[in-house]
Image (cartoon, helix red, strand yellow):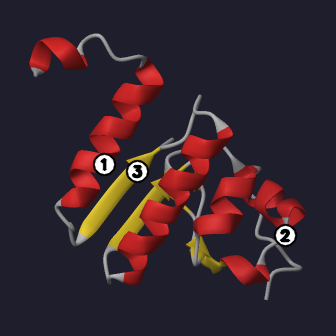
Amino acid sequence: PEARTRLLSGGNMQKLILGRVLERSPGLVLACQPTRGLDVGAVAEIHGRLLAARDRGAGVLLMSEDLDELFALSDRIAVIYRGRLTRPWPAEHLTIRALGLMMAGQEPADAA
């Protein structure tokens, strides 16, 4: 099986690894750029699997540069700025503009 997995494309390898991890129903999922470079169908599948893990009670820590992905999957959003983690905000209280301010090291005034 190892020889066959080496023949997979980067995207298929990414899907295989995430599938193997989520199959075990972990209590915590750390996902760094889980959909980067994947096709739209694979992105939807991975988003669904991450949300299902959350719904089963798993903690899901998502690190992504894709702001749409962050807003679609997150309950709370925090930013790492100059090596420090900002306080997490409820995703429904943030806007793209407020998130941009956080990324620039400012506290978003319009987030409640």
Spatial CA distance of label 1 from label 3 is 12 Å
User: In this rendering, would 57 be left or right of 105?
Assistant: left
Asked if 59 appears above or below 8 in the picture, the reply is below
Element carrying mark 2: loop
**Residue farthest to the left, as pictured:** 1
Callouts 2 and 1 close, C-beta under 8 Å: no
Secondary structure beneath disc 1?
helix
Q: Are marks 1 and 3 in contact (CB under 8 Å)?
A: no
Q: Position of residue 14 (x, y in %)?
A: 39, 33
Asked where in the image residue 61 lies, by quadrant, the reply is bottom left
Residue highlighted by disc 3: 31
Determine whether label 2 and label 3 are within 8 Å by CB: no
Q: CA distance from mark 2 to mark 3?
A: 22 Å
> Could you say which quadrant of the image residue 7 lies in?
top left
In front: mark 1 or mark 3?
1
Relative to 96, does residue 89 appear above or below in the rendering?
A: below
Q: Disc 1 residue type?
A: Gly
Label 3 crowd (10 A; few <14 / some 14-19 / many >=20): some
- Residue 19 — which label? 1
Q: Quadrant of residue 86?
A: bottom right
Quadrant for the C terminus in the image: bottom right
The residue at 34%/73% (across/down) is 59
* Upstream in sequence: badge 1 or badge 3: 1
- The residue that disc 2 covers is 95
